Amino acid sequence: MMKAPLLLITVLLSMPQQGFSQVLAPDALPGVLPDIVPQVTDRVQRNTEQLQQQLIQQQQLAQHLARQAALPDPLTVLPKTLDIVNQRGELSWREVEVEQGFRAIEREWLLLLSGSEWQQLLGDWPQLPALVQSEHKLHALGLLLIKIKVPAELDSAKALDTKLTRTLTTLAGRNHLYQPQNEPKNQPDTAPLAGKEALAYGDVAMCQLPVTLGMVDTAIALQHPALQQQAGQLKIEQRNFLPSDIAQSYGHGTAIAGVLAGQHVNSPLLPTLSLYSASAFYSSNLYQQSATLSHIVQALDWLASQQVRVINMSLTGPDNPVLAGVVRQLAAQQVMLVAAAGNGGPAAAPLYPAAYNEVLAVTAVDPQWQLYRWANQGDYIDFAALGVHVPALRADGDVLKQSGTSIATPVVSAAVACLRAQQPELSVAQIRLALIAQARELGGPGKDPQFGFGVIAAPLKTQLE
């Protein structure tokens, strides 16, 4: 006789709330003790209230997560205005967000011109000397780099048109900021494919020839155990282009140097390397480095003065008339620039200097020859190289797997340096053709917007096809 009430309670607890009024009606419960109905009703009411409270909590959690997702990520998004201070806590310059979401130094503009053009400009704009902050003679490039700070009402290209002649307007650009292109984080190991189907790292050198290579990056942690200089193997000459009272950054440059010549793998890409490192980056925050165009231009001029003919630029930023002018001048001197294509994603706009015709743009692939998920795509992509889950040196002496087009770029730079060492008479155009002969096609015959002409990997062929 007791099984029926227990069974009824179980059924009632499993039914929707709106059905209880009918089920619990007195004429619907023949043979059921009257005192069971209030107990069941109370239990159902409590369960309903608990479910409603849980639903409210879940809705509140969802709203909180949505608000958090809408906030800028401090690891990747800098504030619209950021003061950069020196080691004494004094303001050195102020970063601001400018056109198209890029960043620049507040109200600072650069002029890249010849001595005669500078004299002409002084005659046309008598108030200009009061705006000049610095003047640098670029000896290797044969030009002047003038930095001015304009009043707020002149802080645009359109406004400057009222002061500069049409010819000189094309030589002026903001003092833009440029950033490295890597994703420093712990990367999970991927199971490599067997045989030749996997793109390996550190198995073989690009070439055994003595080569010379330059780079514009952060400083290199020369004390790293994997970067110890030895006669006849690795030589690093480093120069800092930041003000002496600005703290240098070491992380990214150390990683790039490690890809080129680190002793943490079976064979460095370049076992016999003379590396000229131009340090131009400072820390915008704990996670991001930046370099002003002014410092980058001075760094490139120094590298050219050292007779460096291949320069690695694992950095990106906006198009700028001053940067474009320097690139053209270096190309005219047969200096080869190799730059990261960018980590903006498949739909991102082209980034510079990689998108200039004179520069080799490098994208990244993983060990299974798949394109890096955040790599820029476009007609300007020239070559791909291994740049995903790559063991990279840290400034603190450790090794951490990193990904990005920054990490892939020095592989192509190493190939260009080997070609230059193998056949010094090759022109920039001939080197490009030689690299195409080296590349393994991935996206079909010819050039494509994902992989360019294909993947460059060690070793360099000794006999070009």
Image (spheres, rainbow, N blue to C red):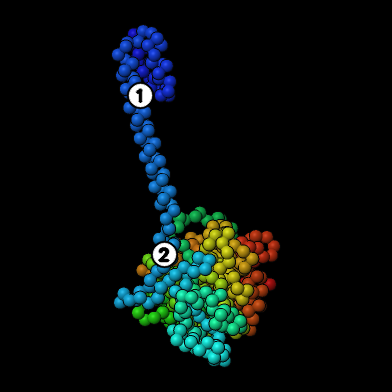
Answer with left or right where residue 279 lies relative to residue 199: left
The residue beneath circle 2 is 79
- The one nearer the camera, 274 or 247, is 247
Residue type beneath disc 1: Val
> What kind of element bears circle 2?
loop
- The one nearer the camera, 314 or 352, is 352
Answer with left or right where residue 350 lies relative to residue 19: right
| As drawn, 17 above or below 168 | above
Q: Position of residue 185 (x, y in %)?
A: 43, 60
User: Which residue corresponds to the image point at 48% horizontal and 87% vertical from the top-left?
Assistant: 127
- The one nearer the camera, 407 or 368, is 407
User: Which residue corresponds to the image point at 49% horizontal and 86% vertical from the top-left?
Assistant: 128
Which corner quadrant holds the C terminus?
A: bottom right
Image quadrant where residue 72 sits? bottom left
Q: Position of residue 39 (x, y in %)?
A: 31, 19
Image quadrant where residue 43 sits? top left
User: Which residue corresponds to the image point at 50% horizontal and 84% vertical from the top-left?
Assistant: 145
Residue type beneath disc 2: Pro
| As drawn, 298 above or below 64 | below
* Mark identifier at residue 44: 1
Q: Position of residue 125 (x, y in %)?
A: 52, 87
Q: Is residue 306 visible?
A: no
